[in-house]
Amino acid sequence: MMPENCSRKSVSKLFHCLSREIEKQQPKNVIHFMVDFLCKNYGSHLRGFAHVWDVDLELEKEKKLVIEFFKSQKLTTEIAKHFINVGFDSMESLLYLNAHVLDDIEKFNNVNWLPGHKIRLQQMFSNIQENIKTFYAEYDKDDIRHGLDYSALRQQASYTVLSPFQQF
């Protein structure tokens, strides 16, 4: 156990470091920024919380990938969101779909897709495994990967880490 004086120094040092980063980054949501900062730099001290906090980011990345897949099939982001709303929010979940469920997805979202979009969806799901394989091949070549922008999902910043637990 650390002496009380050392603990206070560590906390003071942490707050100083956080204050400096907040001034430098000027985040819109300071609380969110602080939690991100702590999870990124002091995750081992948070006893699993950092993993839970970052799960949302991974889910958002998966949803973005689904949207990019639909865009690669010449379908709109809005149509991709209809599938995400129904729970098909990962590439893996799309593998279980076929053209027969399109009407249910359309009804659930209370929309009417344009005939051309519906035909494109039917074609896409008639050969979904091959389409996903082709998508990943393009993605791995970085044709799509660099087009993905996750910065809107969670503000990422480069932090200057100064461990509050270091002793002088």
Image (tube, grey):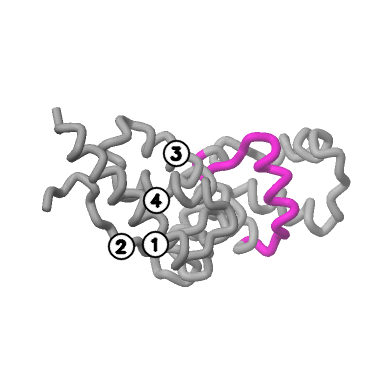
Placement of 123 over or under 142, stated as above or below? above
| Amino acid at pointer 3 | Trp
**Mark 3 vs mark 1, CA separation in Å:** 23 Å
Reading the image, the residue beneath label 4 is 37
- Who comes first in sequence, dot 2 or dot 3? 3
Residue at x 64%, y 47% (from the top left corner): 125
Q: Secondary structure at mark 4?
A: helix
Placement of 2 over or under 34, stated as above or below? above
Q: Kindly indicate whether the residue at mark 1 contacts the one at mark 2 (C-beta within 8 angstroms).
A: yes
- Who comes first in sequence, dot 2 or dot 1? 1
Point out the frontmost of discs 1 and 4. 1
Check residue 160 in the rendering and tell me which mark sits there, or answer none: 2
Reading the image, the residue beneath label 1 is 20
- Who comes first in sequence, dot 1 or dot 4? 1
Does residue 77 show up magenta in the picture? yes
| Amino acid at pointer 1 | Arg
Point out the frontmost of discs 2 and 1. 1
Q: Kindly indicate whether the residue at mark 3 contacts the one at mark 4 (C-beta within 8 angstroms).
A: no
The magenta-colored residue range is 73-92
Residue at x 68%, y 50% (from the top left corner): 80
Q: Residue furthest left?
A: 168
In the rendered structure, the answer to whether residue 124 lies left or right of residue 108 reads: left
